[in-house]
Amino acid sequence: MTEATTTFVEAINGALARAMRDDERVIVLGEDVAEGGPYLATQGLAEEFGTQRVLNTPISEGAVCGVAIGAAQAGLKPVVEIMFIDFITLALDQLVNQAAKAHFMSGGQLSVPLVLRTQGGAGGRAGAQHSQSLEAWLTHIPGLKVVMPSTGADAAGLLASAIADPNPVVFVENKSLYYRREALPDDPEPIPLGEANWRRRGDDVTIVALSRMVGEALTAADRLAAEGIEADVIDPRTLVPLDLERIADSVRRTGRAVVAHEAVRHGGFGAELAARLQAAAFDYLDAPIQRVGAPFTPVPLSPSLEDAYRPHSDDVYAAARAAVRWAHEAEPVPITRSATDDRSPGARGR
Amino acid sequence: MWRIRCFEERVAKLHRSLQVHGLIHLSIGSEGVAAAVCGQLRDDDGVYSGHRAHGHALAKGAPMDRVMAELMGRSDGLCRGLGGSMHLVDRSIGFMGATGVVGGNLPLAAGDALASRLQGGDRVSVVFFGDGAVQAGHFNETVNLASLWELPLIFVCENNGFAEFTPRSAHTKVERVSDVVAPYDFERRTVDGSDAAAVWSAFGDYLERARGGGGEGGRGPFLLECLTHRRRGHYEGDQQGYRDEVAEAEWARLDPIARLQSLAVERGWLDEEAVGAPEREARAEVERAVEFGRGSPPLQPDAVAEAVYAS
């Protein structure tokens, strides 16, 4: 199949249906899932598998997450949907204190084969409580795995592996990718968690991008190529476990790195990536690692403000150029807003 | 009940001499509830408990020596010394877990009951919690879900009148936990938790109906509120300036063991001679458990990182 006919959200839907057909222990629960949910990710599942396995729930994120954990500990494989990642705050006790620690605290007796699907990201003019990118919090918790697919094919393959995994996996989708179309095989192969994907080859700079920013990085790479700068673009696909070696190999070859995500840069996963990469490739680096992310503010509503807030290919382009130019300048290059607008608590505003 | 009482009295001493670690919450005074509830369950019935969990674990069938070793942080503990007093688990006998986050166990037990329903068996799930958990959001969310889905789940509240360091009246206007769930219209009762026979009878009735019969699967939920007396502080080391000690005469009325013994002698189930035997046997078992724990080394530090993820 080569035609770009399948949307990201259809890829998710197909992966859920296949998992439910293959294994009757797989159940889906969440708000409005039997009706398909607001993005139709679970459309048709209740019709095929019945409302015993596709359970609508009340707006009780904490208890719903807890029910899924309890069911997982008793031998089911629940896929729970939290409609917006912003609402994961209400389920964090269950996710962090129960799911993440059950295997460890029980000395290996319990396992929690749970997938928590959710979606984040700005761009929908939805305001600061329906637009966040909160994955960094989750990567900080030992016991959780965190997945962030950037394409429908990856989403299908990674979701299959996440459902098969005996650990709790948080599967973070980006709502602005949902209706992008791509060619997808009828039965996509599972993609192992912990394998980064090389999306573009180049020797001048490594761009590590997450989720929506992978596409932005590829756009930036085309623009850089027109100027004779060839970028390696790598999508880690899973943040925990992280395929550091593949990324570090690239950085050791290019000597320059940009890490890009949509989340607020301050305390974002890019900070972890930058720290790990500088330790793994310190002797090879020709420039400081550049970080692209959102400024340290909530997501604003007004379209012009939200567009300015949201990182895009221009930011990746500017950061990559800054990294590449670094070696050619006698003085440090003042770079894009990525370095100058991190107004963390206590810092003075400009 | 004597096994729980003697175990916990010994744990209190071991805690003072720093041989048992962490925040220790004792259930002395409410052993009757643990024994009367867990004594009627099968190994495949799932039980979830909270921070005051020793009694529930022992009554469900967790081996005392491994429970003691767990509290001592040893590798032969139930959870290899990685969990501790508030996180006991013995999956082999359906003790599915305890949690240190008040109320956090409630939805897990509902999930256990949901799994039971979908797996087609007649397992029943039970969750123990204190009256303090009732004011947590998880309680209302879980009660709502369990009643909506008619899950085979029995809520067992040990209402000892104190939520940590303050009386129930400082937390809520609703005195009885069984009244809190009234609008959900499922069966609920409040019993004297110091009367083990009353708990046995009330719980047995709910259990039979939650399990169902004729292969149709059970229905629930049910809520059993047991009014108990917390003999010790919230945790070991609690100065308890917020309450008066009950007089010995009052304690004799509240002590579930003393009451059951009197009843047994009165009814002729036990003669005066035989009454002392369970305590003697329990104390000997506890000493063997302490020796077992002392003889077990803690895990090697390099084993910790290996224990985080299942494979």
Image (spheres, grey):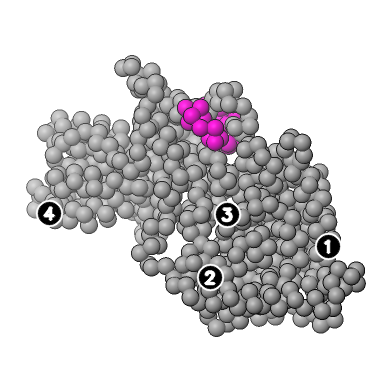
Q: Which mark is residue B92?
A: 3
Q: Chain of mark 1?
A: B
Magenta highlight on residue A37: yes
Q: Nearer the viewer, residue A290 or B292?
A: B292
Closest to the observer, A100 or A265: A100
Other residues around mark 2 within 10 Å, as few (<14) / some (14–19) / many (≥20): many
Circles 1 and 2, Cβ within 8 Å, touching? The answer is no
Q: What subunit carries mark 3?
A: B
Q: State whether residue A125 is above or below residue A74.
A: above
Other residues around mark 4 within 10 Å, as few (<14) / some (14–19) / many (≥20): few
Instruction: Report the residue at 40% width, 37% height from top.
Output: A161
* SS at badge 3: helix
Rounded to the nearest whole Å, what is the CA distance between mark 1 and mark 3? 27 Å
Residue at which label 4 appears = A331
Quadrant holding the N terminus of chain B: bottom right
Crowd band around label 1 with a 10 angstrom C-alpha radius: few (<14), some (14–19), many (20+): some
| Badge nearest the viewer, 1 or 3 | 3
Tag 4: amino acid: Glu
Point out the stretch of residues depicted in magenta. A18-40
Q: Residue at x 29, y 40 (%)?
A: A196
Chain at numbered mark 2: B
